[in-house]
Amino acid sequence: MIEKEPVKVLIVSGSEKGAEYLLGIFSPPLFEPPCVANNAGEAKRRMAQTEYDIVVINAPLKDEFGTSFAADVANDTYSGVMMLIKSDIFDQVSCGLEELGIFTVSKPTNASLVYSASRLCLATRARLLRAEKKNESLLNKMEEIRLVNRAKWLLIQNLGVSEAEAHRLIEKQAMDMRQSKRDICVRLIRTYEN
């Protein structure tokens, strides 16, 4: 069995009682001892220093209700975001947040429900990180294609070879020099564009 790193949690709660309740749910060994902030400003400062797996917002906060902060976290990070909202305004607030991928929980609530929501936050975070990796890989492939095409064009222009011959030259140099096509193309571009 693979041993997992403890989950990093940031609890943002305008009420000390709410923070204490949440601290009891997010306890070791599955979770690192959580960090606690009592307002969005403090939470933003903590997030600038540390990347959190889950951010739990117990609304309202001391400096804002918490929806704006939750939206910022969801849009700017890969953290799973959960927001606890009083039941009398839950339906009004949760609809807009759920569209952003923020898990909303009506309070009063129970530990089991908050724990389950935290697992969903982790699953969402894992999916976002996989998508980011895939996106990065595709961007790298696109960049390599651009470099290869630019290098081929320069070989065609400067050596008078066909596109197929230019492609073979790049591949042969990469094989002979035991370098990537990307490195060969960068070198060819520098050579012929200077």
Image (spheres, rainbow, N blue to C red):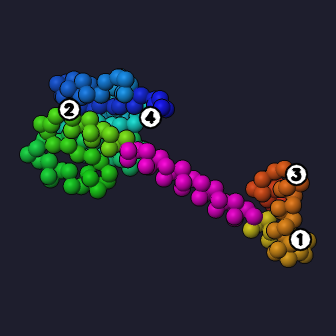
Disc 3 or disc 1, which is closer to the eye?
3
Dots 1, 4 in contact, CB < 8 A: no
Neighbor class of circle 3 (other Cα within 10 Å; few <14, some 14-19, many 20+) is few
Q: In the image, which disc is placed on residue 51?
A: 4
Neighbor class of circle 1 (other Cα within 10 Å; few <14, some 14-19, many 20+) is few
Q: In the image, which disc is placed on residue 111?
A: 2
Quadrant in the rendering for residue 172: bottom right
In primary-sequence order, the first of circles 3 and 4 is: 4
Residue drawn at x 26%, y 51% as measured from the top left: 97
In primary-sequence order, the first of circles 1 and 4 is: 4
Region of the chain picked out in magenta, as a range: 123-148
Q: Amino acid at mark 4?
A: Glu
Quadrant in the rendering for residue 34: top left
Residue drawn at x 82%, y 74% as measured from the top left: 164
Name the residue nearer the viewer: 54 or 61.
54
Q: Amino acid at mark 1?
A: Asn
In which quadrant will I find the C terminus? bottom right
Disc 1 or disc 2, which is closer to the eye?
2
Query: Mark 1 highlights which residue?
Result: 158
